[in-house]
């Protein structure tokens, strides 16, 4: 065995080792993205499971885009800040949801809730203008796009109408508590590195979120959760209408 290795140039051995390390790193990064997308689906499922603490049905039904950032953490950059990675999807022209676009969010003007531990974030883009800001690949909440802490409760009504004037409604969950959060000052950008890993090349936000890119298999759980909670509202609303009509007829 020693004689075999002795006949191989050292430079080739080094290149082989480096290539193995590179492949291992790529596999890990791909796995991290898949886990993050799966975690985003679970965040939506867990949040929407508690009716009186969930995102209102009206907000989900009218959402133009939905972004989830699981486990946002506090970081030390200068005076400190917050950073997280997640994925976003938008409604396309035919009403379906686009492939997920990797995003990152960084902000230093607001503090993490409840002692500074990691939190889950959900952002709901409520109108076309907010969607256009997201498609631009980089925008600042409160400056480029108006943002407000979102109302809570599946049946929320009047408060929801007021909040819907904001382009982006923001929510956070920490230690099992879910509530609207003020994210003004946070910057949302496309995560170019993870976009390249997820799609094997760089694809602009506008192409991904407009439905021009086919969703990868790892995105199925996340997109299924988004469809479930954005479409079941209309179904429940239709059922209520049918029931009311039947009652009136009797």
Image (cartoon, rainbow, N blue to C red):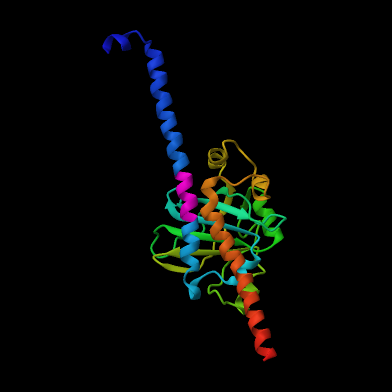
Q: Position of residue 177 (x, y in %)?
A: 43, 69
Residue 12 seen anywhere in this rendered image of the structure: yes
On screen, residue 136 versus residue 181, left or right, reads right
Q: Position of residue 2 (x, y in %)?
A: 27, 12
Identify the residue at horizontal 44%, vertical 36% (top origin). Answer: 27
Q: Position of residue 67 (x, y in %)?
A: 56, 56
Q: Quadrant of residue 141?
A: bottom right
Residue 213 shown in magenta: no
Residue 184 seen anywhere in this rendered image of the structure: no
- Determine whether 3 is above or below 236 in the image: above
Q: Nearer the viewer, residue 8 or 80?
A: 8
On screen, residue 47 versus residue 90, left or right, reads left
Most extreme residue toward the left, as rendered?
2
Residue 36 shown in magenta: yes
Q: Dominant secondary structure of the magenta stretch?
A: helix
Q: Nearer the viewer, residue 124 or 227?
A: 227
Q: Position of residue 180 (x, y in %)?
A: 52, 68
The range drawn in magenta is: 32-40
Identify the residue at horizontal 46%, vertical 59% (top origin). Answer: 42
């Amino acid at each position: 065995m020693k004689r075999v290795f002795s006949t191989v140039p050292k430079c080739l051995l080094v290149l082989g080792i480096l290539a193995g390390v590179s492949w291992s790193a790529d596999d890990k990064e791909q796995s991290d993205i898949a886990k993050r997308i799966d975690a985003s689906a679970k965040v939506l499922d867990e949040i929407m499971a508690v009716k009186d603490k969930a995102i209102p049905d009206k907000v989900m039904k009218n959402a133009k885009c939905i972004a989830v950032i699981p486990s946002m953490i506090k970081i030390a950059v200068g005076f400190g800040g917050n950073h997280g990675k997640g994925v976003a999807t938008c409604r396309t022209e035919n009403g379906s949801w686009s492939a997920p676009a990797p995003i990152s969010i960084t902000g230093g003007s607001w503090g993490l809730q409840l002692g500074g531990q990691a939190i889950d974030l959900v952002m709901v883009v409520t109108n076309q203008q907010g969607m256009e800001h997201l498609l631009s690949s980089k925008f600042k909440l409160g400056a480029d796009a108006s943002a407000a802490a979102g109302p809570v409760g599946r049946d929320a009504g009047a408060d929801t109408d007021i909040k819907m004037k904001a382009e982006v409604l923001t929510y956070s969950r920490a230690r099992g508590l879910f509530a609207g959060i003020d994210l003004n000052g946070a910057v949302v950008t496309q995560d170019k590195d993870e976009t390249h890993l997820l799609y094997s090349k760089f694809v602009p936000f506008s192409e991904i979120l407009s439905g021009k890119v086919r969703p990868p298999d790892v995105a199925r759980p996340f997109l299924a959760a988004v469809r479930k909670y954005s479409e079941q509202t209309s179904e429940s609303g239709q059922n209520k209408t049918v029931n009311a009509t039947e009652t009136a007829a009797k």
